[in-house]
């Protein structure tokens, strides 16, 4: 441990990790564990089951990946003729699966361990060949994993570790039945890890079925948004949203910007509008081919593409260190989704900015978001497309029935009579005083 000011802080070396893993972490620039890593890794090194709750961008992948690699490195004979699958990570989207696979490769580069990523949307040939060659770790999306299991290409007889990552999103996407089928095929004697950003009742019930006697780590459940993300909302009409987006992007030509659309059709439309303004962008969503999605994401990560437009499902696998700005072109109708979106920026120790566009019809969404994050999103003015009708708080509805009009007329007449009588009395008094 190191003394920083008057406080001690833990390093990865203090966790007792294998030397090859420490070397890889050093290459990645990792020195101090994040809170989820600091609390989860010691529990997992003791081979206990774990339920981890932490928001996106807090370092969950390393929290479960590092101890799994440590155990496999310490326990597996790499000289064996045939590698056997010892660890399984299940995650909802192909982008996230690829991202996790990249992390395992980075953290385990000096261990000799082999991993592969399995997902749908592409031909299965290369994935099957990788499985036949032998792997220690599989990172997979539920559908393709279950398909290859049913074809007999995957055996979990020797499995020791299983991770269910982004469990809440998995259930939201309708994978609950696939997950239950996969869990039923796993050996009962295993270490199980269950990670989720939120903890609704359905997640609690599933975790009890999957986990044995488990430890629980919860990182700031009341803190709904990343502390280092600067937030703001623009009030703008639907027709002016594309114009405002162009206006903002032209002011930040060097920044990497992730734009969120609620629908796939909307994402394509945004890309088309930006092209008309000579702003290069690309969309990723469920209707895009895996090749197109990976090409766009790769260009965005290496900086050759500055603007990426994504739907929520596709965006779960986007992890860009220097992402400067997130723009919610459409406010999400599920408040928790807002938290995941703005968590794409301000990751690790970086700061970030998240701006949202809000038209009149989205005011209810904004209200729900502010209730969840327990703060008002700052109102941003001073742009050429201000929607004054949206900006104003809703006014109480004025009564328009006949009885109310009659009452208003009666009150008006009474006031006139009062004024008339008061004027007469004032006249008499003036007359008396002058006499």
Image: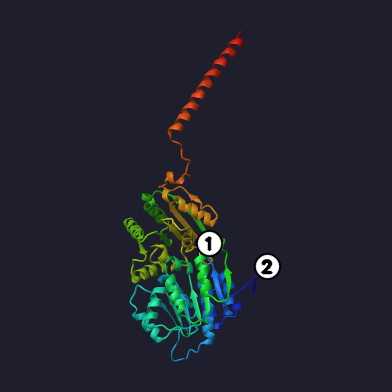
The residue tagged 1 is 226
- Mark 1: secondary structure: loop
Query: Marks 1 and 2, Cα distance to the nearest angstrom?
Result: 26 Å
Position in image of residue 391 (x %, y %): 46, 46
Q: Relative to the observer, which residue lies in front, 194 or 12?
A: 194
Residue 359 in sight: no
Residue count near mark 2 (Cα–Cα under 10 Å), binned few <14, some 14–19, many ≥20: few
- Mark 2: secondary structure: loop
Please give left or right for residue 45 compared with residue 365 in the image. right
Colouring convention used in this rendered image of the protein? rainbow
Position in image of residue 89 (x %, y %): 47, 76
The residue tagged 2 is 6
Please give left or right for residue 299 compared with residue 431 in the image. left
Please give left or right for residue 92 compared with residue 423 in the image. left
Q: Residue at x 37, y 50 (%)?
A: 240
- Dot 1 or dot 2: first in sequence order is 2
Position in image of residue 311 (x %, y %): 40, 62
Q: Name the residue furthest top.
A: 435
Image quadrant assignment for residue 10? bottom right
Residue 391 in sight: yes
Position in image of residue 78 (x %, y %): 48, 89
Residue count near mark 1 (Cα–Cα under 10 Å), binned few <14, some 14–19, many ≥20: many
């Amino acid at each position: 441990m190191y003394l920083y000011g008057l406080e001690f802080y833990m390093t990865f070396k203090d966790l007792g990790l294998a030397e090859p893993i420490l070397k890889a972490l050093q290459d990645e620039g990792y020195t101090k564990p994040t809170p989820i890593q600091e609390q989860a890794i010691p529990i997992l090194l003791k081979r206990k089951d774990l339920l981890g709750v932490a928001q996106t961008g807090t370092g969950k992948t390393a929290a479960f990946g590092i101890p799994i690699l440590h155990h496999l490195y310490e326990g597996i004979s790499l000289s064996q003729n045939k590698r056997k699958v010892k660890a399984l990570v299940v995650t909802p989207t192909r982008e996230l699966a690829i991202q996790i696979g990249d992390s395992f490769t980075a953290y385990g580069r000096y261990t000799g361990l082999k991993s592969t990523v399995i997902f749908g949307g592409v031909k299965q040939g290369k994935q099957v060949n990788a499985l036949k060659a032998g792997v220690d770790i599989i990172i997979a999306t539920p559908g393709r994993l279950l398909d290859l299991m049913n074809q007999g290409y995957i055996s979990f007889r020797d499995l020791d570790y299983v991770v269910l990552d982004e469990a809440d999103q998995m259930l939201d996407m309708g994978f609950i039945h696939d997950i239950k089928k996969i869990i039923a095929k796993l050996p009962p004697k295993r270490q199980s890890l269950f990670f989720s950003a939120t903890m609704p009742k359905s997640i609690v019930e599933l975790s009890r079925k999957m986990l044995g006697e488990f430890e629980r780590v919860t990182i700031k459940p009341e803190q709904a948004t990343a502390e280092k993300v600067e937030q703001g909302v623009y009030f703008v009409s639907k027709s002016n949203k594309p114009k405002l987006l162009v206006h903002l992007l032209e002011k930040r030509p060097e920044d990497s910007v992730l734009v969120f659309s609620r629908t796939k059709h909307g994402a394509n439309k945004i890309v088309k509008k930006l092209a008309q303004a000579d702003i290069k962008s690309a969309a990723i969503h469920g209707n895009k081919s895996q090749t197109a999605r990976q090409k766009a994401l790769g260009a965005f990560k290496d900086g050759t593409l500055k603007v990426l437009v994504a739907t929520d499902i596709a965006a779960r696998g986007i992890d860009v260190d220097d992402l400067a700005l997130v723009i919610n072109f459409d406010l999400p109708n599920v408040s928790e989704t807002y938290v995941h979106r703005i968590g794409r920026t301000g990751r690790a120790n970086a700061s970030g900015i998240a701006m949202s566009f809000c038209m009149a019809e989205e005011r209810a969404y904004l209200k729900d978001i502010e209730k969840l994050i327990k703060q008002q999103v700052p109102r941003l003015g001073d742009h050429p497309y201000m929607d004054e009708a949206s900006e104003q708080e809703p006014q109480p509805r004025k009564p328009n029935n006949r009885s109310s009009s009659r009452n208003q007329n009666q009150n008006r007449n009474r006031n006139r009579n009062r004024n008339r009588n008061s004027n007469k009395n004032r006249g008499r008094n003036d007359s008396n005083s002058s006499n």
